[in-house]
Amino acid sequence: MRLVVGRIGRPHGVKGEVTVEVRTDSPEERFVVGKALETDPADVGPLTITAQRWHKDRLLVRFEEVPDRTAAEQLRGVFLVVDSAELPPLDDPDEFHDHELIGLRVETVDGEAVGEVVDVLHHAQDMLVVSGEKGSEVLVPFVRELVPDVDTAAGRVVIDPPPGLLELGR
């Protein structure tokens, strides 16, 4: 499975450097000089990193294949991707990569079918986006009290929602 680790933004300067919207918890591992990243759309890449640096809160990257600002402008909006097989296993059994959660069926502790995890949001609180019947979506805070069991092998997430939570998306 291909996972997005960044999205190329606007050019920075005239030498082909671009801003990258980071979409990984480990930018220091994903954006290493010499690493070739696949792209989406695929025909744009792979792109090989020749330099990277942080400027304020933005990652700036130069690619071997991008000699100037004009070429950099053509990359705006391109996604940088890696194969999920490249990711190291997590040490903590209570931590998951997003792609391991997306697609799991969701049920309550009583066995009632709720829907399927369609996304994971990372804001002040990690949230599972659960798509239910008729296209409704419910945001479930991803905390042990509300999500007591995640069984990736069985393809399911068990939730213990407080009263009213599931009705919010209906």
Image (cartoon, helix red, strand yellow):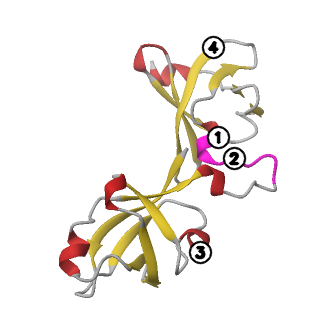
Along the polypeptide, which appears first: circle 4 or circle 1? 1
Q: In this view, does 33 lie to the left or right of 20?
A: right
Which residue is at the front of the view, 158 or 144?
Answer: 158
Q: Are marks 1 and 2 in contact (CB under 8 Å)?
A: yes
The amino acid type found where label 4 is placed reads Ala
Q: Which mark is residue 147?
A: none
Asked which secondary structure carries label 4, the reply is: strand
Q: In this view, does 117 lie above or below 164?
A: below
Q: Distance between the residues labelled 2 and 4?
A: 22 Å
Residue at image position (32%, 60%) is 44
Q: Name the residue under label 2.
A: 96
Residue beneath disc 4: 113
Which secondary structure is most common in the magenta stretch? Answer: loop
What label sits on residue 100 in the rendered view? 1
Part of the protein shown in magenta: 92-100
Name the residue at 37% across, 53% down. 42
Q: Is residue 40 above or below residue 163?
A: below
Among the two numbered marks 2 and 4 on one chain, the one whose residue lies closer to the N terminus: 2
On whether residue 98 falls in the magenta region, the answer is yes
Sequence-earlier tag: 3 or 2: 3
Dot 3 crowding, Cα within 10 Å, few <14, some 14–19, many 20+: few
| CA–CA distance in space, label 1 to label 2 | 6 Å
The type of residue carrying mark 1 is: Glu
Q: Is mark 2 on a helix, strand or loop?
A: loop
Which residue is identified by label 3?
A: 28
State which mark lies toward you, 4 or 1.
1
Most extreme residue toward the left is 70
Residues at marks 2 and 4 touching, judged by CB atoms closer than 8 Å: no
Q: In which quarter of the image is residue 75?
A: bottom left
Three-letter amino acid code at disc 2? Answer: Phe
Q: How far apart are marks 3 and 4 (CA)?
A: 39 Å
